[in-house]
Image: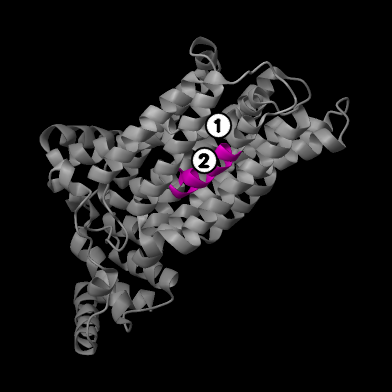
């Protein structure tokens, strides 16, 4: 709710600005704080409340919304330039006013969101966690699925296990990185994911798509239109990933396929920009049109691969007590690296020529693809409560580790279901009869 409040304030300050640079900067600061907080909280919350068999699809909604927002901004900018006179301040003000729509929707929606049951359990509130999980699933302990899921939570967390402040959590995590090899490997793994996500070039292509297309030979109207189409292709790819592919085929094979597609596309773009005449002709050659097609296929590979991987994987593999801290550190690192690469992209194209950045992205993405094959685990069907055990093994064995199927964990026989449900009810009654009566 804090993130939505900050973002709403920022949207208002920028939209009502009448020439004050200070007001614009303050508004942008609030927008950055709000979106930054949402970037951390969003995927964590979704991954914690989602059922195991739907976690991939639901967490990917975070990426879908980002890409839909970027694609929508392309179309809004294109429409405002086409329909509103450049002398009218509403040509730019309209785009800023529209920021209020998602901010208000998010703020109102947060009022009705239940707290994460995993978070409540970690804070030593099993009864509140029970109520939250029951509300999310629409079930109670008469359901063996619900009983087993809740018992899994209880077996994982000690009551009141974590009451640390944010600073203490980070200090504790960094201390564990020194003394505990699995924690060290976990943090390193998440950091590597963020590095390859940024160095895949997806954000740079998104930010500088019009400039890249100008080098290829498109005029200004064509550049804006194609940038909007590029954004729509990314949205369609991530939608296909979320609804059809990820929970059917798994994260690892899709990341391998998407990353491999990106290597091929980036390689072609690097070669093309290295040998083509980039004098700015408005009559693109056949090779230039192939480069445009390569950018489209890059969007498809990006939507299957690194775009959803950076948030989905970080949220899935971290144990709940340190998930928020790990994801926060990872996203802060990611944004710093993203700022550095994005800010440096124009200088890179000048000093390394037009092909240089794409050659660099090609090299990084090729290394990333090899790393995924060896060291990237499959999290499809793996409970979040035991995903972190992957890092007790050698890094080069992680990618080939077997994944237990969800059905074997949550679909016992009929007799087992009755026993589990009965035991679960008796355990809760004996532990806190008063709290259970309040819930029911």
Q: Specify whether residue 201 is in view.
A: no
Q: Which residues are magenta?
A: 293-307
Instruction: Give the CA separation, mark 1 to mark 2.
Output: 10 Å
> In this picture, is 108 found above or below 141?
above
Mark 2 nearby-residue class (10 Å; few <14, some 14–19, many ≥20):
many
> In this picture, is 377 found above or below 343?
below
Circles 1 and 2: CB atoms closer than 8 Å: yes
Residue 298: which numbered mark, if any?
Answer: 2
Q: Which residue is mark 1?
A: 205
Tag nearer the camera, 1 or 2:
2
Q: Specify whether residue 247 is in view.
A: yes
Front-most of 91 and 277?
A: 277
Please tell me whether residue 123 belongs to the stretch shown in magenta.
no
> In this picture, is 436 found above or below 310?
below
Where is residue 241? Give x, y as percent: 47, 56
Where is residue 434? Give x, y as percent: 29, 75
Q: Quadrant of residue 47?
A: bottom left
Query: Looking at the magenta stretch, what is its main secondary structure?
Result: helix
Residue depicted at x 18% and y 34%: 177
Ranked by sequence position, the earlier of labels 1 and 2 is 1
Mark 1 nearby-residue class (10 Å; few <14, some 14–19, many ≥20):
many
């Amino acid at each position: 709710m804090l993130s939505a409040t900050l973002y709403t304030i920022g949207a208002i300050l920028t939209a009502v600005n009448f020439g004050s640079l200070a007001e614009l900067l303050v508004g942008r600061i609030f927008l950055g704080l709000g979106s930054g907080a949402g970037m951390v909280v969003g995927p964590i919350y979704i991954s914690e409340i989602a059922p195991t068999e739907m976690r991939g699809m639901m967490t990917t909604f975070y990426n879908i919304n980002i890409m839909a927002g970027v694609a929508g901004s392309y179309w809004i900018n294109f429409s405002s330039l086409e329909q509103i006179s450049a002398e009218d301040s509403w040509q730019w003000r309209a785009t800023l006013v529209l920021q209020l729509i998602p901010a208000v929707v998010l703020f109102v929606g947060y009022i009705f969101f239940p707290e994460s049951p995993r978070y409540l359990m970690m804070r030593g509130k099993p009864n509140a966690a029970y109520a939250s999980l029951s509300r999310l699933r629409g079930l109670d302990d008469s359901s063996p699925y619900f009983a087993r899921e809740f018992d899994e939570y209880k077996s994982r967390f000690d009551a009141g296990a974590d009451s640390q402040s944010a600073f203490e959590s980070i200090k504790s995590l960094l201390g564990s990185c020194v003394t505990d090899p699995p924690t060290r490997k976990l943090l390193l793994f998440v950091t590597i994911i963020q590095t390859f996500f940024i160095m895949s070039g997806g954000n740079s292509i998104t930010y500088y798509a019009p400039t890249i297309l100008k080098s290829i030979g498109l005029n200004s109207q064509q550049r804006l239109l194609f940038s909007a189409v590029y954004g729509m292709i990314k949205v369609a790819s991530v939608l296909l990933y979320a609804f059809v592919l990820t929970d059917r085929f798994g994260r690892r094979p899709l990341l391998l396929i998407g990353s491999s597609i990106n290597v091929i596309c980036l390689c072609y773009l690097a070669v093309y920009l290295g040998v083509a005449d980039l004098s700015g002709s408005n009559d693109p050659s056949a090779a230039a049109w192939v480069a445009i097609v390569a950018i489209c296929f890059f969007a498809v590979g990006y939507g299957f691969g690194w775009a959803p991987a950076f948030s989905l994987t970080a949220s899935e593999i971290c144990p709940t007590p340190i998930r928020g801290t790990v994801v926060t550190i990872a996203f802060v690192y990611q944004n710093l690296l993203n700022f550095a690469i994005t800010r440096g992209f124009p200088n890179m194209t000048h000093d390394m020529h037009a092909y240089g950045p794409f050659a660099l992205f090609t090299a990084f993405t090729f290394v990333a693809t090899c790393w995924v094959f060896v060291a990237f685990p499959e999290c499809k069907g793996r409970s979040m409560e035991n995903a972190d055990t992957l890092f007790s093994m050698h890094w080069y064995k992680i990618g080939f580790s077997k994944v237990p199927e969800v059905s074997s964990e949550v679909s016992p026989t009929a007799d087992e279901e009755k026993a589990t449900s009965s035991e679960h009810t008796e355990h809760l009654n004996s532990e806190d009869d008063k709290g259970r009566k309040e819930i029911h």
